[in-house]
Image (tube, rainbow, N blue to C red):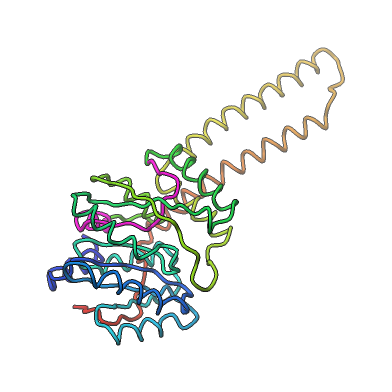
Amino acid sequence: MTAELALNMQKTQKNESVMISVVIPLYGEEGNVTILVDKLLGVLNGTEGGFEVILVDDGSQDGTWASIVDQAQKNKQIKGVSLSRNFGHQHALLAGLAHARGEAVISMDGDLQHPPNVIPQLLDKWHEGYSVVNTAREDKEVASLFKRITSKYFYKFFSMMTDVKMSEGSSDFRLLDRKVLDNLLEFKDVDLFLRGSVQWLGFQQVTIPYKAQKRYSGISKYNLWKMFKFSRSAIISFSTKPLILSVWVGFVTSFLAFMEIVYIVVQFLLGNTVPGWASTLSVLAFLFGVLFVILGIMGTYLARIHNALQNRPRFITRKTINIECD
């Protein structure tokens, strides 16, 4: 059992009255905290049983943590976790999930693109018996064409490269039953891709659509480079197919190189001047390029093994508010 899961179970045993936990990672969202909490309370105050809202500050450089503290001081059901530095969205989300005590745990983003008024629909499906309630994003009105296309084909490519099927519009806006979350917290993945992990776990799942809203304030922190790193890590976490593919590419390019050598030897034995030295050099350059790509793929997997062996914590908590720690 991991330390994160042990901490989570201790909290669950200490207060069984919390039925719903809402976990929200935040990075540079100072302008969104107040309106986000107001909208959440407007929805959650009408639900049955207790609830808590866990806001995780992922090493923000603005006043995000101060805003969280201000809201937590006004309402004990608002809880805050401040990480020691920026660990990334998935790690911050994991930190919040590790502190959640609810029997139903809902995760969502803090920019209000995930509308809080969808929460009752998630809970309805949970009460029907579903252990995982996923959402499918409809974002034609708020997302650029480039983002929609890249997102669509990423999930197609991910599903093709792995044994985990992901549908278009998937996100981290979902509800997890307590038994699902307990199993999820046992994962020791170095490169976190929680939505893939949830799909891999199985359990009885259902998906409901929602219309993504415009960001309330601020700008997205997910640039093209971060999207690429996230996609690469997600695929490597769940598939060894890139390694297998690199082996086949190596076979094919080796065969082409061998045929090129045979051609040169035959021309030499026939006493002909070997034509096309420029093309020969081009082929060699191509083969070396392929070789370095293959080495890069292997190096990426080796780096992941290296990081796993270091066994570093996936997040470090700097301080908390309204969270009891034993």
Work out whether 10 lies above or below 286: below
Q: Report the span colored magenta.
A: 165-186
Which one is in front, 27 or 120? 120
Indicate left or right for 19 with 246 as reference: left
Quadrant of residue 266 in the image?
top right
Q: Where residue 87 sits: x, y (%)?
A: 43, 68
Quadrant of residue 94 in the image?
bottom left
Q: Where residue 96 sits: x, y (%)?
A: 31, 68
Magenta includes 80? no
Image quadrant containing the N terminus: bottom left
Indicate left or right for 252 with 29 as reference: right
Quadrant of residue 162 in the image?
top left
Count every numbered label the image shows and give the total.
0
Who's the residue at 50% across and 50% down the image?
Answer: 232
Q: Find the residue positioned furthest to the top.
A: 270
Q: Where residue 301 sits: x, y (%)?
A: 46, 48
Image quadrant containing the C terminus: bottom left
Which one is in front, 40 or 107? 40
Who's the residue at 40% across and 79% down the image?
Answer: 34
Who's the residue at 83% across and 32% down the image?
Answer: 278
Work out whether 296 lies above or below 114: above
Which one is in front, 191 or 18? 18
Q: Where residue 294 sits: x, y (%)?
A: 57, 41
Who's the residue at 45% across and 75% down the image?
Answer: 32
Indicate left or right for 292 with 310 as reference: right
Work out whether 31 lies above or below 177: below
Work out whether 241 lies above or below 104: above
Magenta includes 185? yes
Which one is in front, 268 or 318? 318
